[in-house]
Image (tube, rainbow, N blue to C red):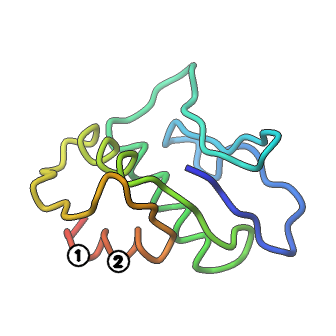
Amino acid sequence: MEVILANTCESFTGSPDRTLGYSIQRRKDGFFAKRNSKGFVPKDGHWNFICLCAELAQKHLYLSDIRVPGWEIFLALEEAGFNTDNFNGSVSTLYNAQDVLTLKERISL
């Protein structure tokens, strides 16, 4: 997942919620989500991290948007143990923050 920073934010690394097991890491070509290699990662940590970043982007506080491939959302839902039969998204689709929040509401997660 790519994280796009708000214009007012020069850098944003680390974890907005340590209990999820994911953090934001700076790379040469931008900021991206990274699974923590050490420590506990809850089974729904990936999905909740995606949703948290989408919510932050909607508020435009630190993030302006996110870009998540459909396959990553599908895997996050499977990891969390959710029924992916209701996931009508395409694994080749690129989702933004609004798309993620709409999906979350549509499949009642």
> What crowding class fits label 1: few (fewer than 14 Cα within 10 Å), some (14-19), or many (20 or more)?
few
Does dot 2 land on a helix, a strand or a loop?
helix
**Residue 93 or residue 6, whichever sits in front:** 93
- Residue 106's tag is 1
Q: Residue at x 51, y 41 (%)?
A: 19
Is the Cβ of the residue at disc 1 closer than 8 Å to that at disc 2?
yes
> Percent position (x, y) of residue 50?
47, 55
Q: Describe residue 102's horizontal placement relative to residue 30 as left or right.
A: left
Amino acid at circle 2: Thr
Decide which of 7, 20 is in the foreground and name it: 7
Q: Residue at x 87, y 74 (%)?
A: 8
Front residue (pair 27, 63)? 27
- The CA distance from mark 1 to mark 2 is 6 Å
Judged from this view, the residue extending furthest toward the front is 92
* Quarter assignment of residue 37: top right
Q: Position of residue 52 (x, y in %)?
A: 51, 61
